[in-house]
Amino acid sequence: MKVGSASPIGGGGLRALPDRVLVALLGLLGRLPERPLVAGADAIGELWYRTAPERRAQARANLGRACAGLAASGRGTSRARRAATDPDALERMVRAAFRHAVRYYLEVARAGSYTVEEAVARIDVATPDEVHEILEAGRPIVLVGLHFGALELPAILVVHLLGHPVTAPMELVANPVLREWFLRSRGNTGIDIIPIVDARRRLLDAVAEGRSVGLVADRDLTGGGVVVPFFGHDAPIPTGPALVAIETGAPLYVGTARRARGGRYEGSLIRVQTPEEGRLRQRVTAMTAAIAGAFEALLADAPEQWWGAFHPYWPDLVISPAGDQPRADEETGDVD
């Protein structure tokens, strides 16, 4: 029996029913007017903020460190610099982060409803020179994103500008019905999803065949990253983007799209140069450090839109199950 097929007898059909209902609801979200949905997402974000102490504490720790790093280097908005020393300002940023995280999930649910025309109309490109450079070169690129702002609309715009699908690894959900929905919705944006496990060969092949690749690479999910400075403190950052760029010669860009007023988005790209000298590990480490620096520059405009802040980045800022304080790092015993 196929997954999701109805059966009046046994548990299989009953277990699939909620999945089908959920997928139907996701489809409905793509057809409803956006403005009331955004208001609803903000309300859910406020409720989530009030009922998730551990996530709240993790976001507070991460955003506090990011804002302190921005203030120390004279970067970031006045809001971010104020949050570096003002606990109330930091807490307002944490609350905003919950709202933006729910907005991201809403954007994922609506991914299949976005059109190229809508993406072009709603995204203001803040770095037109980099976009022109990509189009002029006419070659595949390595595009690196992070858990920040929006991903769905920018993906449509990037695929449109490049003129070919983008191959991207992603953690696939275990539920087969939801997995199929994710693959279909991301496929509608021009993203060819591949499993994150053993993705390196397929990414290299994609570039060799003239296709660009995209990686969301601010979190070290597989444990194979290198430790580089991130807002002034060492953090493991994935090496995949640097390895693909070095091994293929494809130019690498770090890109984001932050939410702006009026339902608009501001897209930015930063070119990261590929080191030409040194051993492979040295080049990978240097390029990964430069990618982390680009992450910092892009996060500076709106740290509250960094929904990755709900997850551990720095070993000394991993929130314990109690949810209030960072736990000591197991190797050094230090607590920041």
Image (cartoon, helix red, strand yellow):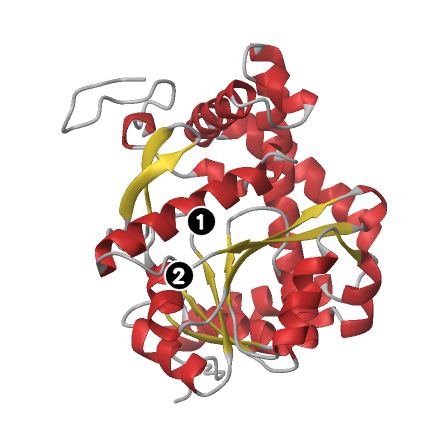
Depicted 194 relative to depicted 62: above or below: below
Q: Residue 111: in sight, yes or no?
A: no
Q: Residue 32: in sight, yes or no?
A: yes
Task: Please name the residue that numbered disc 1 is placed on.
Answer: 291
User: Which quadrant does the N terminus fall into?
Assistant: bottom left
Give the mark nearest the N terminus, 2 or 1: 2
Task: Please name the residue that numbered disc 2 is placed on.
Answer: 241
The amino acid type, in three-letter code, at marker 1 is Ile
Q: How far across and how far down the image is residue 58, in percent?
A: 42, 29
Depicted 6 relative to depicted 229: above or below: below
Q: How far across and how far down the image is residue 318, in percent?
A: 32, 30
Q: Which residue is more in the foreground, 195 or 226?
A: 226
All told, the count of numbered labels is: 2
Answer yes or no: do the residues labelled 2 and 1 have beta carbons within 8 Å? yes
Q: How far across and how far down the image is residue 9, in percent?
A: 40, 80
Q: Please give left or right for residue 138 compared with residue 9 in the image.
A: right
Q: Which residue is more in the foreground, 10 or 281?
A: 281
> Residue at left 37%, top 57%?
275
Are there few (<14), some (14-19), or many (20+) residues within 10 Å of tag 1?
many
What residue occupies the far front of the structure in this picture? 277
The amino acid type, in three-letter code, at marker 2 is Pro
> Residue at left 73%, top 70%?
113
> Residue at left 54%, top 25%?
70
User: Which quadrant does the C terminus fall into?
Assistant: top left
Q: Which residue is more in the foreground, 79 or 320?
A: 79
